[in-house]
Image: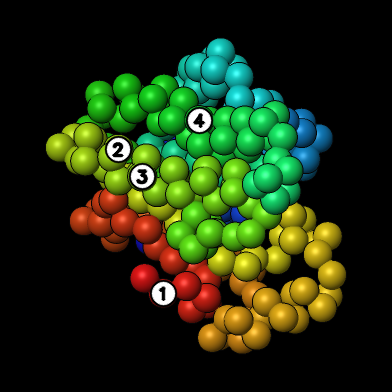
Amino acid sequence: MSLSGRVAFITGASQGIGRACALKLAQKGAAVAVAARNREKLNELVREIEAAGGKAAAFVLDVTDEEQVKSTIKAVIAQFGKIDILVNNAGITRDQLVMRMKRADWDAVLTTNLTSAYLCIQNVATTMLKQRYGRIINITSVFGQMGQAGQANYSASKAGLIGLTKAVARELASRNITCNAVAPGFIETAMTEVLGEDFKQNAAKQIPLGRVGTVEDVANAVAFLASDEAAYITGHVLNVNGGMFMG
C-alpha cells in the first residue's frame, strides 16, 4: 500500500488518532501536512517523521475559523503542489445530558467536528477535481452509529459526518475522488485517558475482541482507504471497533 508521491493533509494531527495517521501515512511514503492548534506538538511530530526519513510540514490551524481553513489549505498546496489525501480528524467533546447541555457546548462540538470537515472538503475539492484524483477520509465514531448518553452533541456531529461522507462520495465519484469514513470504537487516546480504570475494564467487556483499540488500529484503516488498493470503495463507513457495533 505505497503512498509514494502522494500529499496528505491531516487535521487534529497533534495527538491521538490524528498523530498516528500522520506517522502511518508518512511511513507509507506520503508527504504529510499536519494541522492543529498546538504548534509545539506539531513541530515535535514533524521532527519525528523527518528523523524516520519522511517529509512533513506543520500548519497551525483552528478548524472552526473558515478563513484559517482557506489560507492553510492554500499554504499547503503552495508548499507541496497539491493535496491528494484529506483526513478530517479534528474533534472535541463537551459532554452533558441533553436537558442540561448549554447551547454553546452544542455549537462548539458541531462546529469543530462537523462543520470543519465540510470546510476542509470544500476547499480541498477544487485541487482534487483538477487532478482528477482524491481520497477524503472522515473520522467519525461508533457513537455516531449507536448513540451515547451524555453525548448528544458528539453523537450528532459524528452521525452528521457519515451523512456528509455519503453525499460527498456521490458528488465527487465521477472525478475519481473517493470519500469514506472510519468509525473507531473505544480507542486508547488522551480523550479516554481521563476515564477511570473500572470504566475501561467494563468497556472492554462490551467488545467481542476483548480489548480496547489503539490509535494504530485506526491509522491502519485510514492508510488502506488512502491507498490505490481502496480505489473501488467510496461512501463506505469502515468500523474499527472490535465488534462493539456491527451494522
Vertical position of residue 222 compared to residue 208: above or below: above
The residue that mark 4 highlights is 115
Q: Which mark is residue 246?
A: 1
- Residue 2 lies, with reference to residue 246, above or below; the image says above
Task: Indicate the position of residue 54 as horizontal and vertical percent values.
Answer: 58, 46
Measured Cα–Cα span from mark 2 to mark 4? 14 Å
Q: What element does badge 3 sit on?
A: helix
Decide: is 59 above or below 46: above
State the separation of the CA atoms marked 3 and 2. 9 Å
- Per the image, label 4 sits on a secondary structure element best described as helix
Q: On the image, numbered disc 2 is attached to which residue? A: 168
Give the secondary structure at mark 1.
Answer: loop
Q: Residues within 10 Å of mark 4 (few under 14, many from 20)?
A: many
Whether residue 145 appears in this view of the structure is yes
Amino acid type at circle 4 is Thr
Mark before the other along the chain sequence, 1 or 2 = 2
- Dot label at residue 163: 3
The picture places residue 4, in percent across and down from the top left corner, at 41, 48
Mark 1 vs 3: CB contact within 8 A: no
| Picture quadrant where residue 24 is located | bottom right
Image height check: is 33 above or below 21? above
Neighbor class of circle 3 (other Cα within 10 Å; few <14, some 14-19, many 20+) is few
Q: Nearer the viewer, mark 2 or mark 4?
A: 4
* Rendering quarter of residue 100: top right
Q: Which residue lies at the image location 37% right of the left edge and 40% below the top edge?
A: 164
How dense is the environment of label 1, judged by Cα within 10 Å: few (below 14), some, or many (20 and up)?
Answer: few
| Residue occupying the point 73% across, 48% down | 96
Q: CA distance from mark 1 to mark 2?
A: 24 Å
Look at label 1 and name its amino acid: Met
